[in-house]
Each structure stands twice: as C-alpha cells, then as structure tokens.
Image: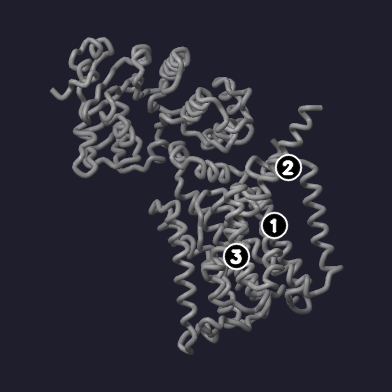
Amino acid sequence: MTWHTRFIRLLEGPQTLGRGPVFWSAASLALLMAVIYPLIIDGYTVGNTVYFFTWTFMALGLCLIWGYGGTLSFGQTAFFGLSGYAYGVLTLNFGAAYGFTLVALLGSLVCAAILAAVLGYFLYFGRISGVFLGIVTLSVTLVFERFMAQTAGPEWQIGVARLNGYNGMGGMPPLTLPWFGGNIVLFPDVGLYYFVLALLVLTYLGLRILVNSKFGNVLVAIRENPERAEMLGYDVRKYQLVAFVIGAVLAGLSGTLYTAWGQYITPSSMSITAAALPIVWVAVGGRGDLTATLIGTLAVLAAFQALTIYGSQYALVVMGLLLVTTVLIAPEGLIVTFAKFAVRVRRGHKGSS
Amino acid sequence: MPILETRGLNKHFGGLHVTANINLALDEGEIHCLIGPNGAGKSTLFRLILGEHAPSSGSILYAGQDITALKSFERIRRGMSVKFQVPGIFKALSARQNLEIALQHHIEGGSLDAETDRLLAFLNLSEVATQLAGNLSHGQKQWLEIGMAISLKPKLLLLDEPTAGMSPAETFATGEIVQTLNASGVTILAVEHDMSFVRQVARRVTVLHLGRIFAQGTIEEIVADERVAAIYLGQGHA
C-alpha cells in the first residue's frame, strides 16, 4: 500500500462519517465559502464568526474523549480557563514582541496538558469511570471557578498580571504573527479569522486521521467493550489518558483563542453553565462523529446567540430542551441520525431500482 | 514445567470463600476442562488467572514465572488469551474491524488485510465482514470472538463456556476447532457444562465444588466417580 492510499484510508476510515467524492467536494466547497466569507461580510460579523470558531476546538476535543473514548468529561472548561488565564499571565508579563504571543499560546496549551495528565492519571489509573468521571471533572472546573472568583485582592497577582477575581483578567494583547518588517497583529476580524480557520481545518483533519488510525480503533474498541480490549493486550488506561490529554489541549486552545479574541477571560468561563454547554453542542450534533460535532456545534452556537437576544436565561432553557429532546429522540445526535437515515434511503432506493 | 500453575489460590469476598486453596497445574499442550455445579468458583478462578480479580492469598505462575502481580493486559501479552462466555465483541464495529483490532497489535500494513481475510474465511464470516458485529447471529458472534482470541497467537487459551447457546452440531464443530488449535500447540483451559463437549476434547478434567478442587482425573475416571455424580444431583454437602 502506498503512502497515498494509506493517507486517504486514514482520512475516510471506518470511524468517521463522510467519504467519497461527494463528501469531499461538499467539504471543499464549504471551505472555499469560508475562505471567501470575510471578503464579502462586514468586520463585526467576521469577528463574531471567529468567536463561534474558537469554541469548536473544545467541542472536537470532547467528541474525542466522550464520543470516541466513551468517557464523559464534564469539566473541559477547566482546561479552557486554565489556558486562557495562562495566556493572559504570560503575555501581560512578557509582552507581545517577536511573536511571543505564539510562545504564550503554546505555553498555555502545555499548562492544560500537564493538568490533564495529572488529573487523568488519577482518574483513569484509579479506574474511575462512568458518571463518577463526570462528577470529578465537573468538581474540578467548579473549584477552579470558585478559586479564581476570590482573587480580587491585590495580593493575587502573578508578576504584573492581576487575576482580578470575578471581574476577570483583561488587557492581554491579541495574537501576533512575526513577519518581515513588523508583526502582524491578529485583531478579531479578518486576520484572526484566517488564523483560526487554518487551525480548525488542521485540527479537524488531524483528528480524522487520529480516530481512523490504530490508536483510534483501539479507543473505539475500549468504548465498546473495555474488558475485551484489555484482554486483547491493550493497556486501556493509557489510551484513555492520551485521548483525555488531547481533548484537554483542544479545550485549552479554545480558551486561549477566546482570550486572545476578546482580550478578556473571567471565572464564569468555568462555571457550571459554561461546563454544560459543550455537552449540548456535542450531543446535539452527534458525539460519535467529528464532522457531526463540528457542524452541530456551529449550528447550536449560532442558534444560542440568536436566542440570547430574547434573554440569556430563556436561551439556556431552550438549550436544555434541545439536549433532552436529542437524548430522547435521536440519542446518537441529530446530524448522525440524519446522515444514517440518508444513507439508508439511498441504499433502499438503489436496491429497488 | 507446567505452563500454568496456581499455588494455594484463595479468594474471599468478606467472609465468603469463593475459591479455597486451589492448586492447579496445566501441562503444556493439554486440553483441560473445569467443571462443577453453579457457584463452584469456576468463573472466579478464571478471573483470578486473567488478573481481573486479585487473589486474597496464593500465587499464579505462568511458564514458571510468578504473574500474580501482573495486570490483565500484561498477562495477555505474555501469551494468554480468553474467550468470554457472553460474546465479548465490539458491537458497533464491523466484524472485520473487530478482527483488525485484535490483529493490529503484531501485524503491520498490507499483511494485516491479508491475515484478516484469511481469518474471516476460516471463521465462515467473509460474507458478513462489513456487517456490524452486534447484528450477527449468536453463533457468528461466538465464532468472531474465538477468532479475536486466537488472532493473538496465544500459548494458553482460556475458554469460558465456549459452546453456551450452541446447537449440538455447532458444539461438535467448536470441539473440532479446539482440537485443531490444540494440535498446533495451544494449551487450552475450558470451563464447560456440556459433557458431550468435555468428552470430545478433554484429556484431563478438574471438578470444582464449593470453591475447592473436588476431584481430578481423566474424563472416564470423573464420569465413573460417584461422588461427582452426587454433587451434580445436589447431594454433595454430605
């Protein structure tokens, strides 16, 4: 098998929906539209779209941990917040010159990875599973939120960076790309849009390859039957831990991009509401598939924002209803259910003709 | 040297002694059947050997080395394999993927496809290779899991009621598979209720009763043993 066919096989392997020329043509068209989009739309809308994009990394990470790995983390926002604050602390102290913001971005992801490795070690090697894993991870994000909320006093500062309690940390610089003749500052419009879009495409394709690789096969096998997977000689805990760390890094990436986008991060980004929303995004689209998660997340985010015009509490109630409805009617997720239905209809059509 | 040996193996849950002082030795290349009435401790003994339970006391030796402290997956990597009673398969994956996941540990790239095809044909599953394992018939699920268990090329294969739910013809076919495997050098330890299967394959039989080894011998000796017949009729406490 050449590397070329092997690559294609990883991109559209058994663990992902969407394959063949029709799917990839549609995906290319969507990407093309996404590339043209900021050239024809006003700056505010572009900035708002970047805002939607920033959350998708956390959703894709949760999709990996929950949909593919079978363990529900309720606390992805802990990594989101940690990375956001880490980005703030690093850039406020060391500035943005010479592309340091990118170093800070990487540093913030390392923080998320370390927390996830330590927490995940105790969770998975301690054989904590099912609902208890959700409870522990939720507790972590809530403890983190409470802790940051009480850091209003002047004694809570790291270098020159004040943590500022419930008011949150602000004033950190946006991301910058070092370039000949001066940095390119990625303000939350066209510049940041292309940067985040590129990251999103890379993350999406990278995860597709990951879940269709041998690693992904074993991860799904563990979700289906952990005892059998172990009795095939796989160290179940290691696979789950690696997936957890990758998912946490992606949540951290969301946090850092969000912080750089708004130049602002607060403890409420780790609250119970914030922690619950990623679960809604992923469940509604379909946790078992990356593409469904991506589309579902963007759709739910856009709908949520449209609803908040009528009041944010009202919008949250609708989100709750959406989650309950999905779980009852299409537990695999609306998009996954629809995709499977479409495939069945097409097969049936072919069969009868 | 026995390939598997348990020395004074005890397991108690609180005050309940599920296995007591089990000394069992398996010679390399034999087919050994474990029988005994419900609650005799057969499944617990299996779980102890596989490392799913830690023994309260005693030790387990594999090929002369103490493996009592090893995790399940480490024991599997040393050459053990198991087929569970309820088919342990990955229901949401195709039959083909089930086998690939079992095989990919030690086979690379193109030969993985070839080996998977060979195994599918051997198990009579080629026709249903792309179907989800959860949609296969009961017999096919059993075959699929046997395929997963043997794809590890084990030296010691543990079978937990391999013929449960099978017709007499299927049971006989399973017995033939077990004998073929054994002829290729695999040592087999099977828990089984079906005496026709035990008669067909076993060279030695161990009878467990109330957590202890009650009798041991060839199938003829066990069948002729009146005490064994008695415990199956529920008079064993006398």
Mark found first going from the N terminus, 2 or 1: 2
Residue occupying the point 32% across, 27% down? B3
Q: Chain of mark 2?
A: A
Q: A44 or A98: which is nearer to us?
A: A44
Q: Are marks 2 and 1 on the same chain?
A: yes
The kind of residue on which mark 3 rests is Val
Q: Are marks 2 and 3 on the same chain?
A: yes
**Disc 2 vs disc 3: which is toward the camera?**
3
Where residue B80 sits, quadrant-wise, is top left
Q: How many marks?
A: 3
Residue A67 is situated, as x and y percent measured from the top left of the image, at: 57, 50
Q: Chain of mark 1?
A: A
**Residue corresponding to mark 1:** A202
Q: Is residue A28 visible?
A: yes
**Disc 2 vs disc 1: which is toward the camera?**
2
Residue occupying the point 59% across, 28% down? B116
Picture quarter with the C terminus of chain A: top right
**Residue corresponding to mark 2:** A19
The label number, if any, that marks residue A317 in the structure image: 3
In the rendered image, the residue lying farthest to the bottom is A154
Q: A17 or B101: which is nearer to us?
A: A17
The Cα atoms of the two marked residues, 1 and 3, are separated by: 34 Å
Where residue A131 sits, quadrant-wise, is bottom left
The kind of residue on which mark 2 rests is Arg
